[in-house]
Amino acid sequence: MAFRRALATAALVAGSAAQVAQFSDSGYGISVNVPSDTASSGSGSIYVQISAPSGTEWIGFGQGSQMSGANMLVVYAADSTNVTVSPRLGTGHVQPKVNGNAQISVLQGTGIASDGSLVANIRCDSCLSWSGGSMDPTDSSSSWIYAYKSGDALDSTSTDESISQHDSTGQFSLDLTTGTGGSSSNPFVAASGSSGDSSSAAASASGSATQTASNGQATATDAGTATTIPAVATATGGVSSPLASSNPSTSGSGSSHSASDPNQATRVAHAVVMPLVFVILFPLSALTIYLPYNEKVRHIHAPLQAVSVILMLVGLGLGVKLANKLDEVDGYHQLIGYIVVVWMVFFQPVLGLMQHLHFRKQGTRSPMGHGHRWIGRAFILLGIVNGGLGFKQAGTVGSANVPTYSVIVYAVATVVIFLLYVAVIVVMPRVAARKNGSNNNLGEKPRPRSQGYEMHNRSVDRAGYA
């Protein structure tokens, strides 16, 4: 009798293992089973196992080819033995939000193993259709994404726990047809065998906690009695062994993947062009007004500012392209950027031109000149601050999207240009005035047209310092 049971169990294990589509990378794995009824009807539940090695802060897999619109399952530690499964919806390259409409069941065999690895066995009743997308259960090349963060355990039972920026991301496809078949209520326990005896494994196969993500809690249904509990699965029957191999070449239907961000080139280009314009080109172009050259506005200042505006528009195009990809077109960084660009393209040059024409006729500075100078400075400063907000939006300092060196370079360049700017417009005029033995020309006085000095009213000599 015992021998027959052993043979039956072995057959069940072999059969179930063949009904799983798998993918794995560096120990982060997913296995998907599509029951026969789901495949034939095109609706119903699918079963998902997510696994991650020790030292994982969180691991997430999502259905779709990009974060925007992806149906995600994020797993992290609830405590030293249990895990939390958080269903979320991707809205772009920002922290995904909890999906209050998701219907999932966290099955037995879920938990944290003795080696610290995380395993989550999940029945998903809302993985074939969700807000923003759908999946064909018979798709031989279904699109998936994944991301993970290494670090200390979150130890949280809340499904809306805040998670840090990922360390790595990737894309892959699964041939769901290779994972189709069977009718087990927990194929992962049957396939792998929990770390308990056969009787506990059988008990685990029939147990589940049904979750509806809402306000950081989950609803558990057991023997017809509904109670509200934290979204935690307790490994009462032992933790399942991950089915997805750590070797991608043996990961069943898992296909090639890329751990690189497909938007990285656009992100880097935008992050280079815009700081170049606002931190370096605009301020230095403004300082050309102080050059001892009578035709500096027409020959130097205006052409340099024109080049800066063109580069700024290139940076804007890159930013809009990136924002569209990340579904962040109306983010705070983007909105401030739109305002700054509109001013610098349409209004700042008009004020400068009007001052130039006024100076050629009157030889004095007009209200347009005051506006061109002070409002221009304000918008350059706003652009620099918005660059910092761009770093904040992209992620935490030290992450893949915001390398520490990039923030250091940005900060150092800003400080150096600021000190140079202050030295030219404040220190140098005062030093030159002392050499001439008089400060009379530092007041708000009009300048003769012959000196060719348009935008600023302080003067010390005919060389043009102010």
Image (tube, grey):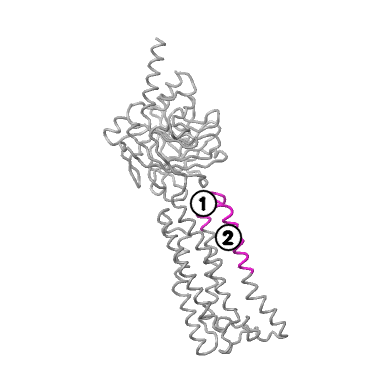
Q: How many marks?
A: 2
Secondary structure under tag 1 reads loop
Can residue 457 be found in the magenta stretch? no
Amino acid type at circle 1 is Asn
Residue drawn 58% across the image and 75% down it: 287
Question: Residue 55: horizontal and vertical position, in percent?
Answer: 56, 37
Query: In the picture provided, is 436 more to the left or to the right than 233?
Result: right
Image vertical order of residue 417 relative to residue 49, above or below: below
* Residue 392 shown in magenta: yes
The local secondary structure at tag 2 comes to helix
Q: CA distance from mark 2 to mark 1?
A: 15 Å
Which residue does the image show at 55% across and 29% down from the upper left? 115
Given residues 52 and 235, the one toward you in this image is 52
Q: Nearer the viewer, residue 131 or 303?
A: 303
* Residue underneath mark 1: 401
Magenta segment, principal secondary structure? helix
Q: Which residues are magenta?
A: 390-419
The quarter in which the N terminus is drawn is top left
- Is 435 on the left or on the right of 417, as rendered? right
What amino acid is labelled 2 in the image?
A: Tyr
Task: Give the residue at x 65% y 76%.
Answer: 426
**323, above or below 65, in the image:** below
Residue 346 coordinates in the image, percent (x, y): 44, 73
- In-front residue for pair 27/292: 292
Q: Which mark is residue 410?
A: 2
